[in-house]
Amino acid sequence: MQLLIDEYGMSVRKASERLVIRDRDRKIIQEVPFFDVHDLLILSRGVTLSSDVIESCVEEGISIHFLTSQGRPFAKVVSPSLQATTRTSNPGFS
């Protein structure tokens, strides 16, 4: 699943093996197990990600995509081991 975070002031934190999404009033609006998520999409300014979330996403192979509100990508966080695997399996690709 692609998990979409698209409202100003939302926060994404880790609780056990789950992503916990809170609104700007700190109310929990969603909890999702890491194993259900393939991509985390951030489409708003003012979103908070904990370092534990970033570390767990990298360990679980979950890419974190940062996009403008118009959907244009401007940053991506991926596991370095996943990138190395891609380069090794495609030696002619650069």
Image (cartoon, rainbow, N blue to C red):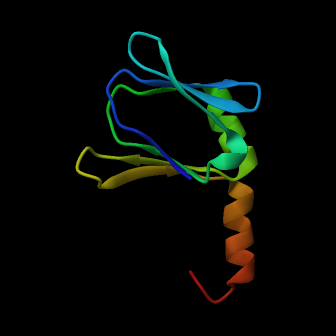
Q: Would you place residue 63 above or below residue 31 in this image? A: below
Number of on-image labels: 0
From the image, which quarter does the C terminus lie in?
bottom right
Where, by quadrant of the figure, is residue 89 drawn? bottom right
Q: Residue furthest top?
A: 25
Q: Residue at x 75, y 45 (%)?
A: 59
Q: Residue at x 74, y 70 (%)?
A: 85
- Foreground residue among 72 and 2: 2
Q: Position of residue 54 (x, y in %)?
A: 62, 36
- Left or right of 7? Residue 84 is right
- Foreground residue among 5 and 93: 5
Q: Residue furthest bottom?
A: 92
Q: Residue at x 36, y 20 (%)?
A: 9
- Left or right of 91? Residue 31 is left
Q: Position of residue 70 (x, y in %)?
A: 23, 50
Q: Position of residue 31 (x, y in %)?
A: 60, 29
Where, by quadrant of the figure, is residue 86 drawn? bottom right
Q: Residue at x 41, y 24 (%)?
A: 10
